[in-house]
Amino acid sequence: MNKELVIVIDFGGQYNQLVARRVRECSVYCEIYSYKTDLNKIRAMKPKGIILTGGPSSCYEEGAATCSPELFELGIPVLGLCYGAQLMNHVLGGKVERAAVREYGKTEVEVDASSPLFAGVSPKTVCWMSHFDYISRMAPGFEAVAVTANCPVAACQCPDRQLYAIQFHPEVLHTVEGSKMLYNFVRGICGCSGDWRMDSFVGEQVAAIREKVGNGRVLCALSGGVDSSVAAVLLSKAVGEQLTCVFVDHGLLRKNEGDEVEAVFGPQGNYHLNFIRVNAQERFYGKLAGVWEPEKKRKIIGEEFIRVFEEEAKKIGRVDFLVQGTIYPDVVESGLGGESAVIKSHHNVGGLPDCVDFREIIEPLRNLFKDEVRKVGLELGIPEHLVFRQPFPGPGLGVRIIGEVTAEKVKIVQDADAIYREEIARAGLDRDISQYFAALTNMRSVGVMGDERTYDYAVALRAVNTIDFMTAESTQIPWEVLQKVTSRIINEVSHVNRVLYDLTSKPPGTIEFE
Ligand code: XMP
């Protein structure tokens, strides 16, 4: 696939993936690379454009993330964003200094609409600012093309050298016309025609997989989540009967989920995946008995998953290829792409390859963002309720039961969660909330039911809205809905006498409780 490529160079900014996603929304393929990437490597990729992201440092400080001045002499258009904008000016002979006050939040910016960056943008538009430092003197040859009340260089350019710099963040939604600015850069200034499309992706992948696999045998771990489902169906389309899918029910799935996955992908469903379901609940509960510590639980669940999978793989015999539903954020977050840090160890990335004897790994979704995976899922005819499923962690309810996991606690949280989901759907809110679930706190407290004293568990309800799951806001669910869910949980789920709603955003909380 010889696609037009734009490179996003990551300086550790929190919006690095958003920049890449916005570029893809312009139908232009792009990848994220660390600022430490060798210039020759970048040159060899022949990108049509380069975007420098924001970052936490001050570019004039010693040891700050930087880039070579040669990056700006490749004859490739470069767009610097926030830190990237400052760095471009700093490296090319301008001056960046600390401002007296931090400029933060939605800010009105006046743009020069004659700049190719701002073609079609309103002369006064709202942007998202977040910076301490500012460009106090532009690099020679640059001219300012946007200002705000506090920022004399909100954007500048040197069109002769195809260099552009924006102090604010066009990639975040608060910058009302930000997508247009990025479109102007990649489609206008870089001259990309927009050849990145999901309908052609399916055809190209099917052909590429067929060629790679030949008549080899393929094994896939299917979880029923969006990524592994899309990967499995794509593979099945490409190689049909040569594929076997193993679905491990670890007993930490949502209520009835195992049966629902089997109904779609099993022998009674529409696909021919050679679907094998392994009911391994008891094994997992046994291994988790007496274990409290979150990372230890994750590790046990991950390892046991691998053991079960390994045993099934041995039964199948020879395996030539192993399929994984890795997607692009997994690649970036596991440190292979950009600069981000790991907070929790997610077991579904890696691990499996070591346990199965196979020739090669196939990761057909490795370059896709989640919304692109969903588009592929729809192209493949996978039911919408699966394609738009909210994320569910690999260790499942194991990280939604605080403290020790037991079969009894799993049942409590499954029942409470099912009620919560039912009521959210009934209120028509299911598509508006990014992720929501019930968790079982390890707290027991005194209550009264009928005339009896109770001493039972508290269930916590969580709902968040987020674009990238790296930051999130707690959702404002209407009070009546919360009350309905609460009373149903108390009435219908034994051993629960209290329901709490978690208002914490991320940060400082995480989305899951463990
Ligand atoms: P946190 O809790 O880190 O969650 O704010 C961010 C997103 O990641 C999911 N998550 C996991 N996914 N294995 C996974 O596959 C895990 O161990 C894991 N922990 C959290 C979480 O559901 C949310 O969507």
Image (spheres, grey):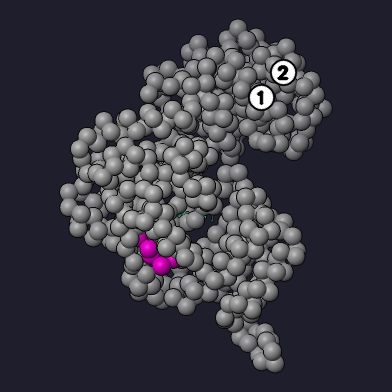
Q: Which residues are magenta?
A: 248-252
- Report if residue 455 is visible in the image: yes
**Label ID, residue 180:** 1
Quarter of the view holding residue 487: bottom right
Query: In the visual, does 153 lie left or right of 276?
Result: right
In this rendering, is residue 68 above or below 388?
above
Residue occupying image coordinates x 60% and y 7%:
160
Residue 378 location, x and y as percent?
49, 40
Report how many numbered discs are placed on residues in the image.
2
Residue occupying image coordinates x 38% and y 63%:
249
Residue nearest the viewer, comparing 151 with 461: 461
In this rendering, is residue 354 above or below 34?
below
Residue nearest the viewer, comparing 409 with 102: 409
**Is 249 in the magenta?**
yes
Q: Secondary structure at mark 1?
A: helix
Q: Residues within 10 Å of mark 2 (few under 14, many from 20)?
A: some
Q: Are marks 2 and 1 in contact (CB under 8 Å)?
A: yes
Q: Which residue is mark 2?
A: 120
Residue occupying image coordinates x 33% and y 42%:
236
**Label ID, residue 463:** none
Query: In the visual, does 247 lie left or right of 401?
Result: left
